[in-house]
Image (cartoon, coloured by chain):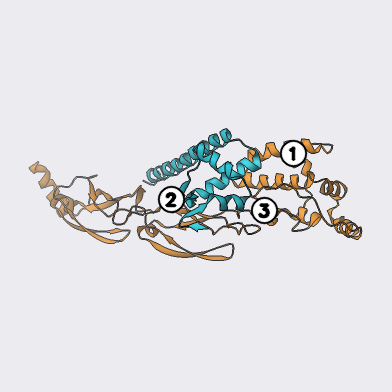
Amino acid sequence: MEFIDYYKVLGVDKSASLDDIKKAYRKLARKLHPDLNPNDKTAHLKFQQINEANEVLSDPEKRKKYDQYGKDWKQADQFEQHRQSQGRSQYGDGKEFSYGSDSDFSDFFESLFGRGQRSSQTKFRGQDYNAELKLALNDVMATKQETFTVNGKNIRITIPAGVENGQVIKLKGYGSPGVNGGPAGDLFISFSVADDPRFKRSGNDLYTNVDVELYTALLGGDITIETLTGKLKLKVNPETQNGTKIRVKGKGVPVYKKEGEVGDLYITYNIKLPTNLSEEQKRLFTELSKLN
Amino acid sequence: MQTGEMITVDEFCIHHNIESSFIYSLKESGLIEIEIIEEKIMIPYEQLSSLERIVRLYYELGINLEGLETISYLLQRMNEMQQEIVRLNNRLRAYETI
């Protein structure tokens, strides 16, 4: 456990007055408050540090103890025993921000001041949690249910078909429990949808390249391709050119939360020329070329 | 008492230990919407999260109503831009995998 220089955290001198500390804290709090820095973990961490520093330095008794024992925090217990023997047991009520909770305080703080020293009875909403759920592209082709664990709690959620990479959903009340009977925070789940080597996705449409034999492209015929939802039979028109793009309606990604609406699949034909021609094939191609 | 997806202004204010006049001033400035149902003044549940944020900013950081309006607008813009970045990243990723 490392010593935390609360004066440095707030950017004030050791001789700073209570007013200086309040000003410094307020200035930093306005910059680092989690409501102004959503999803910024660094700002959140710094906010907890300044909250903790303010908790100590704005309370004369805590500040005195910190100044006296801060660097030698291991002696704090002796101080505590001595203090209790003198019949004093209450610290002052420090104004706190509702994002704090006992667990937000550092080990250093708790070793010096103990747990549960926050005496406010105000009801505070619990902290929001953030989680990431990794999905493959074919996972978003149909609505599915998945169970996962957040902070030791099993949560079963429905993942609607068509979720996009980076999309965030909110589960009300699945965050940290509230303080003093306050409501629980929310759980924000961010979906990370992996790329698929065969298909690229643009919104609800899918794009893919399909190899077609030269003879099928020239004379027409049927081919079967793999899609994210199974095999698909296609009719190739005679004299299909290389790079021809076709649209297969309704074979893309389902539209998020719009039942029955599905994007399209765009297929680009890649005509494969034969290699290692036999003498007979060469002769026939030569004859064909003469017809041109 | 919750009525469907609503909470009364009184209950919200007791819960957060704030004056109901603050809620009405937020309504006046257009930062929140409140509804009157069976003579009770209610806050729609979907506004709770942003309302709680406003309460924190007002009471904890001492930001006045004008500041709250500006912050709410900028946070909304920031959220829209973050979503746009996600969309653009997804499109860019699609081109990069060709």
In the image: residue A76, left or right of residue A166: right
Q: Position of residue B55 (x, y in %)?
A: 59, 44
* Residue A50 in view in this figure: yes
In the image: residue A120, left or right of residue A89: left
For the residue carrying disc 2, how many other residues have a C-alpha within 10 Å: few (<14), some (14-19), or many (20+)? many
Q: Quadrant of the N terminus of chain A?
A: bottom right
Please name the amino acid that badge 3 sits on.
Thr
Relative to B66, does residue A289 appear above or below in the rendering?
A: below
At 61% from the left and 50% from the top, the residue drawn is B16
Instruction: Name the element at disc 1.
Output: helix
For the residue carrying disc 3, how many other residues have a C-alpha within 10 Å: few (<14), some (14-19), or many (20+)? some
How far, Cα to Cα, is label 3 from label 2? 39 Å
Mark 1 / mark 2, whichever is N-terminal: 1
Please name the amino acid that badge 2 sits on.
Asn
Instruction: Name the element at disc 3.
Output: loop
Please give the label number shown on residue A22. 1
Tell me what hue chain B is rendered in. Answer: cyan
Mark 3 / mark 1, whichever is N-terminal: 1
Residue placed furthest toward the front: B39
Please give the label number shown on residue A122. 3
Give me the chain letter of mark 3. A
